[in-house]
Amino acid sequence: MKKRISAVFLTAVLTAALLAGCKQNVGSPEDNAVMDDQENTEGDTEETEHVLGFSCSDLSNPFYTVLEEALKSSLEEEGIRLIVQDARSDVDTQIQQVDELIQQNVEAVFLCPAEWEKITPALEALNDAGIPVINLDTEVKETDLVKAFIGSDNRNAGYVCGEDLVSRMPEGGRIIIIENSGINSINERITGFEEAILDGGFEVVCRIDAGSVNIGDTLRTLLEEEQINAVMCGNDVMALQVLEVLEEAADKEILVYSVDGSPDTKSALLDPDSPMTGIGAQSPITLGKTAAKTAVAILNRDRYEKETYVETFFINRENVDMYGTDGWQ
């Protein structure tokens, strides 16, 4: 009888030991493989920082500096970091910089092209990498390679300058046009300007391509040889060079028009002795903010506008005070 009790007791002890060995801590991480998976899952759900790229044609142009600031601050409000590249007006440099952005695994690229057609290889590389492109300010030629375009109504900006010139010179006159054939936004401005003066009796004495010749030297030569009534400039950077030459020549009779609306050209409008006459104004601040909203929509797979054209308007001596001269509108 004692042997039987001892055997039963021994069996019970062994069973308890085996059970204890199989499951020492019920429900603990080391005892539950599923918990390890949950820990890994929790690590995976941490928010990943979004990083976007901005490839700018030329940050020495104040317009693009202000656009960059508006874009960057708007993205920072959304917790998005922006990597900025400055091509310094060299399209080959820009193509290389876009490749660097691809290597940095950015999720989207804002692009202001240094040249609207020659930038195509960079667009193709971004497309192959599956990185969406948000084209800013100057529209690229291959528009099917971009997700969205945000720019100013450049044709209207040029048109309002032409309208004002016609009103001031109803009999027509002799004009110089300063352009840049590689920058499509400037092409649009000049197109709008020429549409406005088409039947006004104006003669285009010379077209100066700022992308290939020196504006100042060419203009000085023309002023010595030709009678000029007005100069239309594709942007404010060009206009400031024209104003400098005219100041040297002490010529206050020539009318100068431009597109942008920088503090410098608006300040020139306040000077009664300046040839600066009118500006087709745009807002780099609005462009930057709109571009940021579009990028966020693309990242979130929300709806967005494929093309956005921001309003442009005319600034002259009569209304410049309304817009101010200490910053961009």
Image (tube, rainbow, N blue to C red):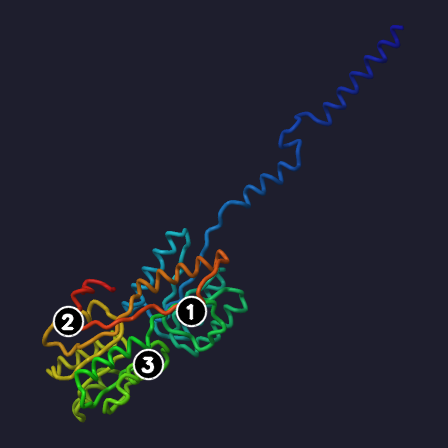
Instruction: Left or right? Give the position of 136 relative to 238.
Output: right
Q: Where does label 3 land, which residue? A: 180
Q: As shown in the figure, which amino acid type bears the numbered disc 1?
A: Glu
> Which badge, 2 or 3, comes first in the chain's sequence?
3
Name the quarter where the C terminus is drawn: bottom left
The secondary structure type at the circle numbered 3 is loop
Cα separation between marks 1 and 2:
33 Å
Mark 1: few, some, or many residues within 10 Å (few <14, many ≥20)?
A: few
Instruction: Left or right? Give the position of 247 relative to 234.
Output: left
Rendered location of residue 110, percent (x, y):
41, 65
Task: Determine the residue positioned at 29% across, 85% down.
Answer: 194
Name the quarter where the N terminus is drawn: top right
Cα separation between marks 2 and 3:
29 Å
Q: Where does label 1 land, which residue? A: 307
Q: Are marks 1 and 2 in contact (CB under 8 Å)?
A: no
Identify the disc placed on residue 318.
2
